[in-house]
Amino acid sequence: MVSQNLTATLLLFTTFLFISPSISDVHSPPQLNSTTNDLIFIRTSCNATLYPVLCFNSLAGYASAVQNSPARLAKLAIGVTISKAKSTAILLSKFSRSATKVKDCASYLKDALDEMRDSLRTLRNISRGVGIGAAPSSVERFRFKMSDVQTYMSAALTYEDTCTDEYEEMDEAGGTKTAVYDRVNNLKRLTSNALALVNSYANNGAP
């Protein structure tokens, strides 16, 4: 039993070390025996976001995988946001046949997901040193690549804003509008937080 538990823990740690985009639960992440310093790093980093409580709650469970790394934290934040966007897209698909605005929102959300995936892919390439080169040009190349990540995440947030803007203009009231609007609003907060952490890494993480 101990061996099985140890194996499961190592597998889980490895998964989040590389920041898989398939993180499934934003509000109840698995605990990986995070140290106090790991958690302090998450909390301090989240203070730079607009929604620090949501930021900490969504990322704290993975603190030991982040290990005080701004790069890993940025990738994790995007991965968590992608997971939330996927689940939101599933919800929207259930209502899209009966409500035109929901169908439009689902389309915007698909575009937002594409932008997030591009940002995560670019961040992973940066971590591997792809396109960065050697110093001193590496700093300029890092900043150039990070500007792409920032652009992708900003575009994702714009698509989400467009969705909620249309919902605010809807005459229809009721459960469908409330459920979709609240879900997308929560996604927007996660996206905003992820962008803020990306910005922090872009400003302070040059090699």
Image (cartoon, rainbow, N blue to C red):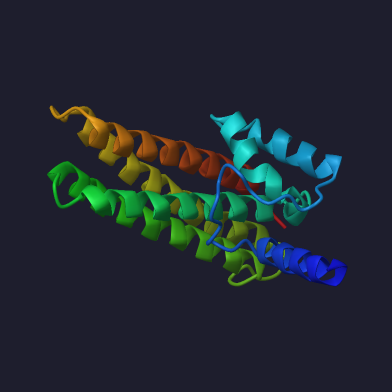
Residue 12, image x and y in percent? 70, 64
Q: Which residue is drawn at 61% across and 64% down?
A: 126
The reply to whether residue 120 is in sight is yes
In this image, 92 relative to 142: left or right?
left
In this image, 114 relative to 13: left or right?
left
In the displayed structure, 37 sits above or below 67; it is above
The reply to whether residue 165 is in sight is no
Q: Which residue is drawn at 62% across and 32% down?
A: 48
Residue 99, image x and y in percent? 15, 44
In the displayed structure, 182 sits above or below 199; it is above
Q: Looking at the image, which is closer to me, 194 or 137? A: 194
Instruction: State the count of labels.
Output: 0
Q: Looking at the image, which is closer to me, 207 or 38? A: 38
In the displayed structure, 139 sits above or below 187; it is below
In this image, 146 relative to 177: left or right?
right
Q: Looking at the image, which is closer to me, 99 or 151? A: 99
Q: Quadrant of residue 157?
A: top left
Looking at the rendering, in which quadrant would you find the C terminus? bottom right
In this image, 153 relative to 52: left or right?
left
Residue 15, image x and y in percent? 67, 66
Q: Looking at the image, which is closer to me, 124 or 181? A: 181
Q: Which residue is drawn at 58% across and 68% down?
A: 125
Q: Which residue is drawn at 31% across and 56% down?
A: 110
Residue 80, image x and y in percent? 54, 51
